[in-house]
Image (cartoon, helix red, strand yellow):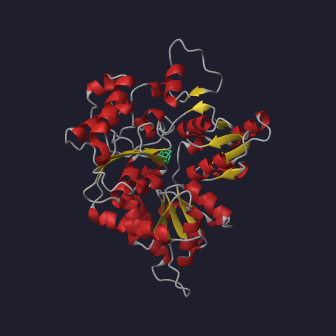
Amino acid sequence: MTSINTAIQLMTREDAEQSRAGEGTCSPDLAKGPWEFDIPTVPERAPDYGPGASLQDLAPVSTPRQGVLPEEYQLAGDAELEARILAAKEALGDRLVILGHFYQRDEVVKHADFVGDSFQLANAALTRPDAEAIVFCGVHFMAETADILSRPDQSVILPNLAAGCSMADMADADSVADCWEQLEELFGTEPDDGGRQPVIPVTYMNSSAALKAFCGRNGGIVCTSSNAATVLEWAFERGQRVLFFPDQHLGRNTAKAMGVSLDEMPMWNLRKVLGGNTEQELLDSRVILWHGFCSVHKRFTVNQIEKARAEFPGVRVIVHPECPMPVVDAADEAGSTDYIRKAIAAAEPGTTFAVGTEINMVNRLAAEYPEHTIFCLDPVICPCSTMYRIHPGYLAWVLEGLVAGDVRNRITVEPEVAAHARVALERMLAARP
Ligand code: SF4
């Protein structure tokens, strides 16, 4: 199998044939080492997210920055990095567990003890109680969740601190608190005759620990893309309406499938009073949607689906619920990464799948299931900008640090924040369909 990284290197070589129209990569900079984007050119300015799907998104000034990766790791070739990672793993033995998200590059995933989505991985780490170090090859909020669920004496490490998530960054704690204050002023804080609160806050797993804690403190809950409908049901039993952040698309797609009309789902624009809504619109709402989105999943379009159907009659189109509503409506199925994996695993041999999710995962599924034809709906290779920041060079650097007794890039969540966030996570685990 050609990895996505290798494909990008080949496509961006000077002597490469011109990419076919509309294909190729979304940025030739993807062929560079991520360390080239870790240091912003103007230090006091917010860094951008770097090449990939989130390149055009605005990063908050507070986005964590990665220091300089020592040159020996930048210059080392693939084979040398692989040998160094394997040697460090061997030296650390059971003291180490490496977690690899589905959207990571193959060159990193091959070293992972567990591969999965963010919540699966945080739970997988719990099965290795001897591990002193949990190296999370994913993005910042995932490492925070692992830290919340792990023991205090275990260190959770993110190999590159610049591996944030542009969607999670779209809802910061101050803006959500401001929204909440306006909603409390409008709706009051007293429950109705049925004991239902005016608003229940629901945060997607893809959010900071501070927002999970906000939900924990305010009678709210966390959801994943696998259990969003169950969680919304839980919230509707306890509240007259829901404030859903940060992903508008997951919120809208899930609530719509449950029968909530689009008129009952106003969007909250954080730059406007009452989020840009009238009082009546908010009073009539069932789900107030935060204006966040995933730039990876926003790339998928109805046109791509029509093209896939024209070229591959009988194709099964499966997309992630972070895709915009028209795309989810046009697809045959929508579901989490876990749903997509299971659907492909259970299909009759010879099935053709067009998949709407991150390209590294789609490429790996195509290799794992050669009995099917599997391709990404988007013909342009455009991986997640922040997942891309994790490169074998950083993995080698943090692992060799551990061997030398130096814990690099540890992610810690304040105990008070972690305690409230755990409440919201526990509510999610207790929620039943
Ligand atoms: S794929 Fe989207 S939601 Fe996932 S880490 Fe990347 S930007 Fe965030």
Q: Is residue 15 left or right of residue 43?
A: right
Q: Residue furthest top?
A: 15
Q: How many marks?
A: 0
Image position of 339 with respect to 288: above or below: above
The quarter of the image holding the C terminus is: bottom right
Viewer-proximal residue among 169 and 78: 78
Is residue 104 visible in the rendered structure shown here? Answer: yes
Residue drawn at x 33%, y 56% as measured from the top left: 129
Image quadrant in which you'd find residue 87: top left
On the question of residue 66 being in view, the answer is: no
- Front residue of 230/232: it is 230
Can you give x and y, in whole percent of width and height, for residue 396 in the image? 32, 34
Q: Residue at x 47, y 39 (%)?
A: 104
Most extreme residue toward the bottom, as rendered?
Answer: 193
Q: Position of residue 132 (x, y in %)?
A: 27, 51
> Residue 218's image quarter?
bottom left
In the depicted structure, whether residue 28 falls above or below residue 150:
above
Decide if residue 95 is on the left or right side of residue 274: left
Q: Is residue 204 above or below residue 388?
A: below
Residue 163 drawn at (x, y percent): 39, 42
Q: Quadrant of the N terminus?
A: top right
* Image coordinates for residue 352, horizontal then vertical, percent: 72, 39
Q: In the rendered image of this protein, does residue 340 appear above or below residue 111?
A: below
Q: Quadrant of residue 17?
A: top right
Task: Tell me which residue sits at (26%, 29%) in the image.
Answer: 70
- Name the side, left or right, on which 405 lies relative to 349: left
Which residue is painted at 51% across and 52% down in the image?
Answer: 292
Instruction: Pick the residue in front: 142 or 85.
Output: 85
